[in-house]
Amino acid sequence: MALIVQKYGGSSVGSVERIQAVAKRVCETVKAGNSLVVVVSAMGKTTDGLVKLASEISPHPSKREMDMLLSTGEQVSIALVSMALQQIGQPAISLTGAQVGIVTEAEHTRARILHIATQRIEKCLEEGRVVVIAGFQGISSTEELEITTLGRGGSDTSAVAIAAALNADKCEIYTDVPGILTTDPRLVPEAQLMEQITSDEMLELASLGAKVLHPRAVEIARNYGVRLVVRSSWTDHPGTIVDSPQPKPRSLINLEIARPVDDVQFDTNQAKISLLRVPDKPGIAAQLFGEIARQKVDVDLIIQSIHEGNTNDIAFTVMKRILKKAEAVASAIAPALRSSNHGELEEAEVMVQEQIAKVSIAGAGMIGRPGVAAEMFATLARKGVNIKMISTSEVKVSCVIDSADCDKAVTALRETFNIEESIPSSPYPPFSPSSSQPPVRGVALDMKQARLGIRRVPDLPGMAGKIFGTLADNKISVDMIIQSQRCHVIKGIPTRDIAFTVARVEAKQAQELLQKAAIECGWGEVVLDMEIAKVSVVGAGMVGQPGVAAKMFTALSQEQINIQMITTSEIKISCVVAEDQGVKALQAIHTAFELGGKEKFVMPT
Ligand code: ADP
Ligand code: ASP
Ligand code: MG
C-alpha cells in the first residue's frame, strides 16, 4: 500500500463540479489500495478576492490580519472536499494547518515551515480516512500560536513538506495544465509538455516566473528526495516527473530553514574579458556572442550591467586555455562596436584579466533568503577581498575575485557557512545533462520585478555587503546582482555602478533604504525602473555548449528588443528587457529554441 499526497490547486476546486471530480479521483486512488492525504488551495480566485477586499478597507493592512483573512479561503475548500468525499461513501476528515501542527516561523505572509507533526494525520489514516489538509497555512511556534501563511502559491510547498514529513511514496500536484510545459501556455499556446525535468531546472524555472510550482516546493522535494509529479486534474495524462538526485539524510526539524548553503566551491581556471562602452542598442550582444559561438568558444558567466549614457559594458569569463582565442574574437569585433561620444565615434575597449578566481556558495536553501548572499559579501569584506563580478542564480552566488585572494576567501566562506572541505571540482548542483536533451528545456517570463541601480559605489571591499546587508536586514530579497565593469575615479576613489532586481512590491522601500544609506556610504544616486521584464532560458544541457547565449540574444535582436541587463548561471541565462516587450521576447525565444509543438494549447474550462 502506497502513501500518496495529492495537492489540488484553486482552479481544480473552483466549483461544486470540480470538487466532485476531485472527490472521485481521490476515491479511486484509495480504492486502488493507497492511503491518501489531500492538500487543497482556496477555491478559484478566492485568495485574490480576499486581497482586494482588504485593500478596499486599508491601503496597508497589517500582515497578521492578512494571514487571518487569507487563511479562511483554504478552510472553506477543505470542508467542502471532505464533505464531497463523505457523500460518495469515502470516510474523510478536514484539518487546518494548526490542527495538523504545521509549525512555522512567526513571519506573517511569508512564513517558512519549521516542523510538521505527523501523529494526527497518521492516526486518521490508520482509521481508514482520507485526510484533507488546508494548504498555504500554518501556526507559529510562538506562545501566541498565530495563524501564518507561506506566501502566494504556497499550497504546493505545504503539500511537498507534508510528503517529506510523512515520508510519502509520492506527491502529486494537480493543476489546470497537463504538467510542466516549455513555457506558460497562456502566453505561448505552442508550449509543449515535458515528460520529465530535473529539480535543478525546475528550481530555476519556478523562481524565474513559471508559477506552475512554488519554488520552495521544489527546494523541499530536492532536499528530501520527494517523488514529485505535476498533472492535470481534468485528465488522466501522467504529467511531468520532477527528478531529484538522491539527497543526503536531513533532519525534519527546521524543515525549511536548515542549512542554506551546502557547498563552497572555487575555480581558478577562468579568465575574464570585458568590453567597455559598447553601444546600448538592440543586436550588440547577439553580434558579439554570435561571433564567439561561431569560433566555438564556450563562455561561462556573462554579465551586462545597466547602461551609462548610451553605452553598456559586457563582461564574460572563459576557461584560461581558450583565453587567447576569446580575446582575439573580442578584439576583432570591438572596432565594429562603435558608439558616439559627443559626436565622435569611439571603439569599444577590450580588457582582459587573467589572475582571477571564481568562488561560489551553492545550496537550494538560499531561495528567497536575502541574508545568505549578504553574508557571503560580508565575509569576503572582513577578509579585505574585493569583488569584481557577481553572478547569482536561485541556488548559487558566485563572485569573481583576485586569484591571490582565493585561498583566504574559500577558507573564510567555509567557516561562515559551516562547510567541511569538499572536493574542489565537485559540480553542484549535480547536473546530469543528457546528450539527447536539447540545451534549453524551458523559458520563463517574470513581470513582477523592478530594477534598482546605485551609481558610483566606491570600489572597496565591504560595499556589496553593506548594500545587500541593508536590504537583507529589511527582509528584501534580491536577484540578478550586477556590477558595472567601468570605473569612475571620484576624489581619488574608484567607483562602479551596481544594479540588481527586486520584487516590484518591495522596490520603493528598497530605494528609500538605499537612499538613506547613500550619504553615509558615499555612493551616488539610487535609480529605480519599475517597467522591466525578465526573460530567461533554462536547461541543464547548456553546460559546455557554445552558442546558447548567442541564439537567445539573436532572437531578441531580430525583434528589435534591447537587452538592458544580462546574467547567467551554469543552467540559465536571464535578460532584462522593457516591460512592454516581455511577452514578445518570451515568444521569440521560445520559437528560436524550437520548443513549440504543432498543436496549440487550449486551457480547460
Ligand atoms: P494552481 O492554482 O493549480 O496552483 P497556478 O495558477 O498556481 O495553479 O499554476 C498553474 C499555471 O501556471 C498555469 O495555468 C500556467 O498558466 C502557469 N505556467 C507558467 N509557466 C508554466 C509552465 N512552464 N508550465 C506549465 N504552466 C505554467
Ligand atoms: N490560495 C493561495 C494563493 O492563491 C495558495 C495557493 O493557491 O497555493 O496564493
Ligand atoms: Mg499554484
Image (cartoon, rainbow, N blue to C red):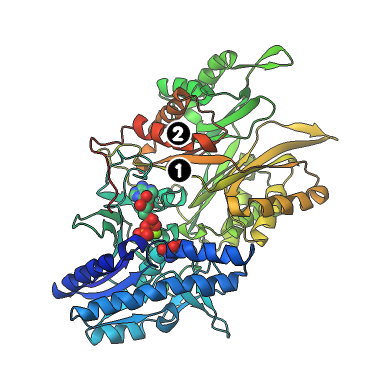
Q: Quadrant of residue 184?
A: top left
Whether tag 1 and tag 2 are in contact, CB under 8 A, the answer is yes
Q: Nearer the viewer, residue 419 or 220?
A: 220
User: Which residue is pictured at 55% across the width and 70% down the height?
Assistant: 66
Which badge, 1 or 2, is on the more N-terminal residue?
Answer: 1
Regarding residue 445, the answer to whether it shows in the image is: yes
Does residue 408 appear to the left or right of 522 in the view shown? left
Regarding residue 426, the answer to whether it shows in the image is: no
**Is 374 rendered above or below residue 122?**
above
The residue that label 2 is drawn on is 585
**Is 525 rendered above or below residue 559?**
below
The residue that label 1 is drawn on is 445
Q: Nearer the viewer, residue 450 or 143?
A: 450
Q: Secondary structure at mark 2?
A: helix
Q: Secondary structure at mark 1?
A: strand
Q: Quadrant of the N terminus?
A: bottom left
Instruction: Give the residue type that dot 2 points to.
Output: Ala
Sort mark 1 into few (<14), some (14-19) or many (20+) by Cα contacts within 10 Å. many
User: Which residue is pictured at 26% across the width and 57% down the height?
Assistant: 232
Instruction: Give the residue type that dot 1 points to.
Output: Leu
Does residue 268 appear to the left or right of 498 in the view shown? left
x and y percentages locating residue 138 in the rendered image: 47, 75
